[in-house]
Image (tube, coloured by chain):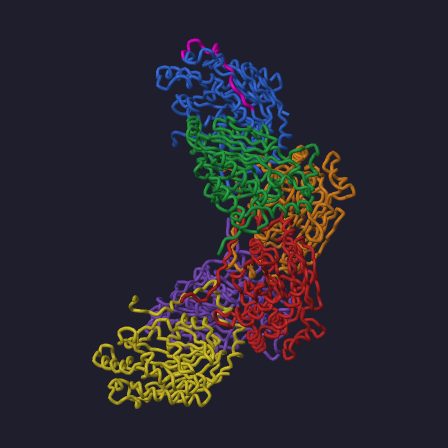
Chain colours: A green, B blue, C orange, D red, E purple, F yellow
């Protein structure tokens, strides 16, 4: 029996170091509550760049300024930032999976990825998945990741992995995780609501897995006042995003949440052993797979711009 | 704008010819209502062999008898049965997609498949898909199909195709349809309820397609009285299966149904041109596909037992 | 000595067939003037989707509607549309290179590419290059192409090829063309102005090639009145895009244009034999290349979603 | 905010020690003005061997004599000469990048390279790049360098690197620098004028970098009178080279210069943080790179004639 | 006993097809005289670009014009030109080794190499060696070859190979040929005189090989009158190059020539079997080699600019 | 400007101490004449064992006797013999390079090497090169040396080094010296005549070095009368070896000698600075080297029979 925590919280928007501070507090809190796996939303550090949906692409001056600010507050892996998260994970004795905007330290240094970062209970970085396809407006700030991090991690809390937001609509990417033996499936996101819940439940059934949907709760009054793009939203809205986190069990039943309109840590207990019984009549990447018909090739190589000494 | 009909009805259980009669009446009715695509449930002809879920596999005598009876009422393609369905389709001016238990005319002649049969508005058989993996108890009567029929059909009602019941939990099979440019996705089934609806909605969102869930409504008093297996159900139940058909649009919204506990033809209008706009931010087998990472090989060859002259 | 024509013109915005009509007239006119190569701007058919720069990504209803409309007026290769262009090219006795928004006929059918289409003077399609990376807001309508069309074509007008708009800032893509022996380099675009001209001149010098910059001239009063997005521009602007086409010779000298603020066919004579003399002191993909140090691997395979029979 | 200085000056032609004296004075002057990076032209020490463009290759006696003289005044790294430059850099508290004609101390000792030497503000040599391909007549005095020095240096003034004169027309070499995360791109040269300026501006846009073009200003009356080759120029010319230095920002705008016809130190302020915002819509070695298609192999090994103990 | 012919002749300067005509006549003549190996001078087709030694590199207009003219008359391998030489070789029953200016058909198409082309007595191209390092002024027209053609060819006339002009001062390149078992060493050249003869004799002794020095005899009145560069020579000179061909035996003795100041075919008989006796006291790449001390690595790979499909 | 002396003289045959006496006298004489480098022939101490060429190998008794006598008069390094040479060098203020037959003091003590010994103007031994491959009959007395002494020595007379007699036909050994930056190349020898002179001239051109060929002049009447092997020569010969020393400059021109038939000290002036100009068009181990293709590994380790403590 594993206790899972989904942290629905607000970052210190576009302030990496202050956001890390908040993350560490939440990790400690969840650790005290007995959680062995703590999940944070998509791009929790340093916040989801929601301006991509309200600032037209032609407004270059605004976009350049925000891009530079996001870049300055993005996360390099490894770095002092990941070290601090590692210490918090180690102190709390829990695995942490957290969405960050990552900087491509390996090449130009000015491109960013929407990354899900995994740190184990010893404080070590054990994996990093860069979102394969940013959605719609997101393409204005994030690049496409490669599949080098599309892996299931065998941890003390079971075999975990995940996809970010609408990546969860990529059947082949999900299949890669099922074929990796995933048991707890993480879905950090900015999405919420009815349709998204249907997807979380479908994935739980399709993969016979626990699904942890974790979304950010962020109010407009939590944005730094100098950010002009906030004026582009309807003034009647209170929430930039209301959250909507939920945890679903392998039968498709919602076992925690959904919660909207508040910051809160959602908890659920996962009995991984019992859950495997659900595979008797469906095992998508097992007896139900038809490998004589379907063969999926995945290039998990790291895309390197330059090779050489 | 295409009018779609999902026929939630009861077959004349284990009586092929009488069931065909009912089917033809429903086709005519839907045709009069303007439908250009009429969908029937999984194994409508000659009924879903639900005994596989209540007769223990060790009860050979009962199973042998029912197997023989099902075989005698199963459908060979082509045959007089398909000819009759073709005439009804032609007369009604509609495409018909209907679930049948199909007999393996090409080899032993004593194996059956759970097949989705396509007939166009000219009365011609345009396709046949044999369910790839029967689920749980179903494996006691149906064999595994090959992928020779896993195709999208370009019809006067748009590009249609489908998977049967829990095949819809096979991500690679669905992907094959998305990559075929499917617009109206058929999901004939025996399943129903909350979890299944979540899946229909997820598929609609994932594929940006109209999804037609079509299930059989069958009461115990509609079973031939001589069938002993009916006594194995709890006596309080009225419905062998209550139905649960529903039609979902490409945004994941339910636009017809779900209906349970009655026979009825469900109708919905599909505006395929407008629907394509929903692909701007997600096109699973298009701009969202990452073919540089994922390459799916599908063997769509017909599995032939003997090859040679 | 080859006469080159760059057509700076306005399409019939979002009306494929009417735009093709205009293209054919321009081809005929240029042919009468003796042109052996006629170049059209980026996405001339059915017009450049400039709304991506003014409609925020969050305005889903507007974007969906425009996406569906663009898709309905996009170009499949081959199709009746390409056949008509082919006839015009044959009748005029000229090669045609024209920017089109192409539909991915090979898979979902709902994804579009920013494509440069090549038709020879016999009316045959000889090549198609899909823009590798759409820029900024363009990512909201166009997908990323593969490199299967990144080729130099050996034609009766010399070795031609091209990159689209800001692809011209991809050094490795340009190098692929230089290494293919390109002599006339096409740069259809939506860009214009001082900085862009510097790039055209640099490319001419870097590659010792003729560079044909060809941009669209489009006034607001040429947009269909029902298109709401036009209201998002400052009302003082007359031109959606003023053009800015220019032709540069291998020394970097501008030999025709730049022209802005009018529709016009720009002509220039290219003496390819004499031009090769400029390679004596620079041949980027020849004696100046240092292949002992730099080896570029290009995957020119077609990205196929599904492989199989 | 970094202050950059480009020194457009004349060397004491073919007199290494006197030229170093002048360089040190200029370094001190720029340091007093607050510069943190001081750039000198191509082969500033001991002057650009312009005779290669006016003396025919068949005039062996003249060429041998000039070759011996250049060799005797060339720079070995490290040596007393580099030590003196280091002291000047340290005293002025600035990084120095200076073009020198370098002697191949590691082998025959009689071959020379066109080298860009980097010294940091502590006076240490941090890098050396030997021009990969001398251009045209330059091949009569300089050998081809290897890529062991083709690196970006992470300094207190940001990530700097550079290419020499027409190396800047090598797309793959530039790409190596972009992929190294370069922010300030140095282009010491002997070239000048319109076409060259277009190239500086293109590079700034392509790489989203500050570009420092730095050229030598040298009058005929500054050549030692005994050098006979000076008589081979038209007598009407006052300048062997008029200079033409300029500094361009990452948008392609010229922010200092170009200056011709005088010696002068050009200054510009570079705000590297703000500049990264320009990468939002173009990051050549980042989100715009397509590493799935293009993979560049660079051999950065040092070319050694003999290996062994 | 093999009869070797060294053709000291003048090309039809910068006229490829006419030069090929002359070459074919000479091949026929030598064949009639019983030669089994016919050697032509360096860049016989379409003539040695001697202007590189008299036109200063700064005279761009003249050099560009000559470069374009040379390029237009250079030789692609294979091509119609090599086919014609092949027919001549076959008809004469002799092997032909001929210097040509080759065009880099595999990449930019505008770079040239100084190539030694081998054709066997069946008319087939059996090898091609591109000069590794052009000398001095030659660097203004020819690029550096790779070592893919640095091979010894086992022919009916014995094991032959060669180096071009001052490549013969590259000890490691010569060693590559000795180690390949060369018996007849070809040295097509533009050089002549005392010093060059010493080198031919030294090579014969060092390698215990027959050395065929073959140089071009070309008078000024044989240059096309429109070539302006001819005026740059002293008017008293009659010969652009007087020839100087000679054949040396493995003891270092000159057995034919040297001849200067006339066109002529030089003949010598080579007794390869007898010659091998000279190896008893010296076998440079045999018992005299000391492989425990010296290990030479040669990269004979073809330098390819782009690798991929 | 350096004055070089080549001592063509006769040793006191097979009498080490008396030969040393003569050597010291010659060193003093040359020093008085201003020489800064004095070169002696191959195996000057205690004379070249020419009997290897006239006594058949089967005549064991004679050979044993001569071997023992040679061994007794051979030179150990260091020893009293080298000390005496050092004092002479120091007194004369000159560098000395002298051929000696060296005894293997480090192992059995009964093997001999053909060694070139270097002593500087302070009287110190600065180097020793043991001939790598004795030629033909020489293999009957001398062993093969290792490459631990195959070095260029940076002296007050410039960078000097050398190879012994037919080692000069080893291209890789010469290359090792060129790559060491050699300026004055010593070739002590027993050879002479036309062919050998061609080799000296070739080396000078190939390496752009001064070459000092130094041979022994020895008459039969200078042999000790008791040596029987002298009777095996034709009686008409006066000279065992007539000498043939010569000095060649870097252009290949003979600037002193050749002299035959007498003892004499040959002098030449070497202007090393001016000579480097000749490298402008050829630098074998510099710009002409192609290190991307050729990489020579040399094992310069000392060959030790036993390794261990």
Q: Is residue B244 left or right of residue E64?
A: left
Give the percent coordinates (x, y) of residue A116. Answer: 53, 41
- Residue E190 lies, with reference to residue C295, above or below; the image says below
Q: Which residue is at the front of the view, E51 or A151?
A: A151
- Residue E200 lies, in percent from the top left, at 44, 74
Nearer the observer, A185 or A118: A118
Which residue is situated farthest in the left direction here? F61
Task: Give residue C46's quadrant in the image.
Answer: top right
Residue drawn at x 45%, y 14% is B14
Viewer can see residue C107: no
Image location (x, y in percent) of residue E55 = 62, 71
Q: Which percent across, then down, holds residue A36?
A: 47, 36
Residue ranking furthest to the front: A32
On whether residue B217 falls in the magenta region, the answer is: yes
Hey, which residue is sitting farthest right in the picture? C236
Numbered disc total: 0
* Quadrant containing the N terminus of chain E in the rendered view: bottom left
Whether the magenta-drawn stretch holds residue B96 is answered as no
Residues drawn in magenta: B212-228
Q: Quadrant of residue D23 in the image?
A: bottom right
Task: Report if residue D261 is visible in the image.
Answer: yes
**The quadrant where residue F231 appears:** bottom left
Q: Is residue D292 above or below residue E88?
A: above
Q: F137 or E113, which is in the foreground?
A: F137
- Residue at image point 65% right, 64% down: D214
């Amino acid at each position: 029996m594993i206790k899972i925590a989904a942290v629905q919280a607000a970052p210190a928007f576009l302030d990496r170091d202050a956001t890390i501070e908040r993350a560490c507090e939440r990790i400690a809190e969840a650790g005290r509550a007995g959680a062995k796996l703590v999940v944070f939303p998509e791009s929790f550090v340093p916040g989801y760049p929601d301006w991509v949906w309200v600032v037209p692409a032609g407004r270059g001056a605004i976009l350049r300024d925000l891009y530079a600010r996001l870049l300055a507050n993005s996360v390099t892996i490894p770095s002092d930032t990941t070290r601090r998260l590692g210490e918090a994970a180690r102190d709390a004795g829990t695995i942490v999976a957290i969405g960050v905007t990552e900087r491509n330290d390996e090449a130009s240094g000015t491109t960013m990825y929407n990354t899900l970062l995994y740190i184990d209970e010893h404080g070590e970085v054990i994996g990093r998945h860069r979102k394969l396809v940013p959605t719609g407006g997101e393409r204005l700030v994030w690049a496409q990741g490669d599949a080098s991090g599309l892996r299931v991690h065998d941890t003390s809390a079971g075999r975990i992995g995940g996809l970010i937001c609408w990546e969860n609509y990529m059947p082949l990417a999900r299949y890669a995780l099922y074929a990796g033996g995933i048991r707890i499936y993480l879905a950090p996101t900015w999405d919420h609501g009815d349709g998204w819940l249907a997807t979380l439940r479908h994935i739980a059934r399709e993969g016979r897995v626990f699904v942890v949907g974790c979304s950010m709760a962020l109010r407009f009054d939590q944005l730094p006042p100098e950010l002009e793009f906030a004026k582009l939203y309807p003034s009647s809205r209170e929430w930039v995003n209301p959250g909507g986190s939920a945890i679903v069990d392998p039968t498709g039943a919602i076992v925690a949440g959904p919660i909207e309109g508040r910051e809160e840590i959602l908890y659920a207990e996962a009995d991984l052993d019992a859950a495997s019984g659900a595979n008797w009549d469906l095992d998508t990447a097992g007896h139900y797979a038809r490998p004589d018909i379907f063969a999926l090739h995945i290039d998990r190589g790291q895309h390197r711009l330059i090779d050489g000494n």
